[in-house]
Image (tube, rainbow, N blue to C red):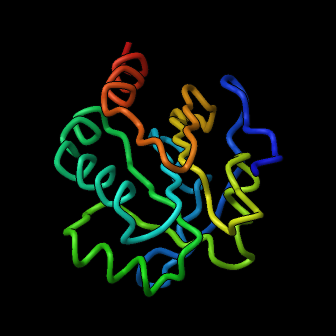
Amino acid sequence: MVEQKSPQVGELAPDLTLPDTHGTPVTLSALRGTPVVIVFVPFAFSGICTGELCELRDNIAAFDDAGVRLLVVSCDPMFSLRAWAEHEGYTFDLLSDFWPHGDVASAYGVFDAERGRAVRGSFLIDADGVLRWSVVNPAGQARDLAGYREALAALAG
């Protein structure tokens, strides 16, 4: 059960520093000047997560055209995320929220402590670090690509 409160639209997004699939730290505040979408997923290699990320991979041009960097966050270890990215051909960053376990997911209100995973939360952060759009779905419910497209269009607005 998720018990934390997600940041609200119009608020400064919580900062994060997490390792990518090669152990290189990625810090949200260091990306200021570039809009970012953070996509939390429950588990690497799981069916719905793979389907969602393959859809994002296949539509990455929508993010690139909007100048938006895509960051995917999972509580899986870095090595699992690297294997998943290589297996599926993901070109966007996959970040490990493994330790402290779920710390960043908790800051975004999407950590399910009972199951040790994130739920499906997506957050669009503008170039100034302000949250402009979010959606949080239960673990078994995929997010709709149309929601991302609408949020990207509104950002460009």
The image quadrant that residue 103 belongs to is bottom right
> What residue lies at 39% left-to-right and 26% top-to-bottom?
147
113 or 103: which is nearer to us? Answer: 113
6 or 60: which is nearer to us? Answer: 6
Q: In this view, does 111 lie to the left or right of 141?
A: right
Q: In this view, does 6 lie to the left or right of 138?
A: right
Q: In this view, does 58 lie to the left or right of 145?
A: left
| 93, above or below 5, in the image | below
In the picture as drawn, the residue positioned furthest to the bottom comes out as 79
Q: Is residue 58 left or right of residue 127?
A: left
| 126, above or below 59, in the image | above
In the picture as drawn, the residue positioned furthest to the top comes out as 157
The image quadrant that residue 117 belongs to is bottom right
> What residue lies at 39% left-to-right and 66% top-to-bottom?
46
How far across and down, in percent of the image, does residue 136 sit?
58, 37
> What residue lies at 41% left-to-right and 38% top-to-bottom?
143
How far across and down, in percent of the image, does residue 114 sit?
76, 64
How far across and down, in percent of the image, does residue 6 sit?
73, 38
| 81, above or below 49, in the image | below
How far across and down, in percent of the image, does residue 84 sit?
32, 76
> What residue lies at 38% left-to-right and 48% top-to-bottom?
69
The image quadrant that residue 34 belongs to is top left
Quarter occupied by the C terminus = top left
How many marks can you see? 0
